[in-house]
Structures are given as structure tokens and as C-alpha cells.
Image: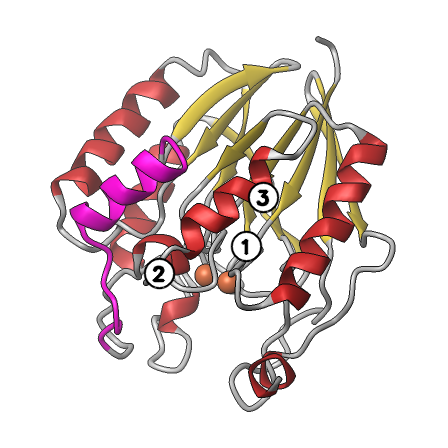
Amino acid sequence: MSQFRLTQISDTHLARRLPTLTENFHRVSAHIDATRPDLVINSGDLAFSVEGDDLAFARGLHAALPVPCRYLPGNHDIGDNPTTAGPTPAHQASEQDRQRYISTVGEDRWRFDEAGWCFIGLNSLVMNTGLASEAEQFDWLASELGRAGGKPVALFLHKPLYLDAPDDPELAASAIRYVPPAPRRRLLELLSTVDLRLVASGHVHQRRDFTYGRVRHVWAPAVSFLLPERMQPVIALKETGLVEYRFTPDSFEVRHVRAAGQVDIDLDSLLKR
Ligand SMILES: [Fe+2]
Ligand SMILES: [Fe+2]
């Protein structure tokens, strides 16, 4: 295949009790049905809550999409990673949560090759936990990158690597927003051995697209809802939507789009209903 059309969706936050979020997902599903990409990637936070059966509910809705899908875990799917500067997560990612994700959704990391590119998906929530699966994932990544064979690499993960630059300090107010500094350094060291071109993430519920060095960083907006300013400053664009990519050997295009009828729902108004 000399071109590969990929649609990234993120932060669907689905729950049976929150039908307005399901409506936004259905608008995005209709867009995917109309555009028929080769693959859909949900870059995490499929579920509204890590407790209960939201993840299974979310998986069921994705099963109805008319194209192949891959998934990555978010903090609302398997719990969060500990940070040094930030508060202790209310629900820290554990091996039990990871196994529940794998049995409900599928693999929490993957690699595939299309259109002359190497695509890698990582579980960013086990990073900094000290779990065995964190070390296993780094070993696995080193081995996969060793087999990239000079192809350009596109990395997908739930949390952005950083705000503006690799050595951004970890701040208490924003530590939960990015990959923690220690695993970030290790990740960047491993990725420095390959031709990394794209880092695509979700998690922040803001649409952003910037380039640092040779690497383009795309923050996919949430499918579901926006965070009010009392909870999160404006960094980029607060809107719901999705991202479309077209990869061809040695290059790629990014389109920032919204599905027809997709609504900007504010978390405060959602929880008031
Ligand atoms: Fe989210
Ligand atoms: Fe998240």
C-alpha cells in the first residue's frame, strides 16, 4: 500500500450514564463511516471512569465501527502514572488494571508497518510506576526500533511527551499532563536512534500541532468534552474533534477536522445534567 489513511480519535470517555458523550461518539462514527480510513486509532481514555464497566461499554461501541481499530490505554482506562512534582494519583495504574484492559480491549502496545512507515503505540500510563511491564515495554520498544530498518517512525501514546521542549521541568500544576521526566528521557534516548517524525497523543482535550526539531507533535482533541478553565488553562485550541493523517513513503499530511454535528460539551455542564 503506497498510501495509508489513518484517523486518530481520542478521549471518547464513554459511559452508559452519559448519553451526550455517546452522541458525540456517534457523530464521529458517522464521519468515519463516510471517510473510511484504513485504520482508526483511539489514543486512550476510551472510558469515562476507570471504575465500573465503562471500558467494556466503550469497547462495545467501537466494535460497531466499519473499519479496523487499534487502541491505547489512557489514565481513565487503567489508572494514572505517579509523578514526582504532582499529587499522588487517586487511582495509580497497576498490573491488575493493565490486565483488565488487555482482556477487555486488547494489546496495550503495538507496532505495525504501512506505506514505508513504522508505527509504534505505547502504554504511557505504566511509565514511572516501576511495574514489571514498564521495563518490559522499554525492552520491547528497543527491540522494535532496532528493526525499524531506516523507516520514518510515527509514535502514538496517550500523554504528550512534553509541553514545549524535551527538558521542560515537571511542575506540580501540570505534572499529570505529560510523560514524567525520567521515562521521557529514556524514551527520547531510544527514539534518537531512529528517524522519528511524528508523536501523536491525546489526554489534554486540546488540539495542538507544533514541531520541535524534526518531530511534529500532534495533540488530538477529545471526541467527548472540554475541561473548563478553572481546571485547565488554555494551551492551544479547546474544541472537540478528530485528526486525519495520510502517510506516503517518506512524507505525511495532517488534517484537523470535526465531525458534522459534534458538540463542544463542557465538563461542568455535563456533570450538572
Ligand atoms: Fe481524557
Ligand atoms: Fe487522559
Could you classify mark 2 by the number of other residues whose Cα lies within 10 Å: few (under 14), some (14-19), or many (20 or more)?
many
Q: Could you give the CA–CA distance between mark 1 and mark 3, rounded to whole angstroms?
A: 19 Å
Residue at disc 1, CB closer than 8 Å to ligand 1: yes
| For residue 159, above or below residue 229 | above
Q: Quadrant of residue 245?
A: top right
In the foreground, 126 or 195: 126
Q: Which callout, 1 or 3, points at the residue further toward the start of the chain?
A: 3
User: Which residue has dot 1 on it?
Assistant: 202
User: Which residue has dot 2 on it?
Assistant: 50
Of tags 1 and 3, which is closer to the observer?
3
| Residue 206 visible | no
| For residue 32, above or below residue 237 | above
Q: Is residue 97 left or right of residue 77?
A: left
Could you classify mark 3 by the number of other residues whose Cα lies within 10 Å: few (under 14), some (14-19), or many (20 or more)?
some
Residue visible at 53% across and 67% down in the picture: 17
Magenta stretch in the rendered image: 88-107
User: What amino acid does circle 3 point to?
Assistant: Leu
Q: Is residue 145 left or right of residue 263?
A: left
Q: Measuring from the top left, give residue 236's x and y in whole percent.
A: 68, 70
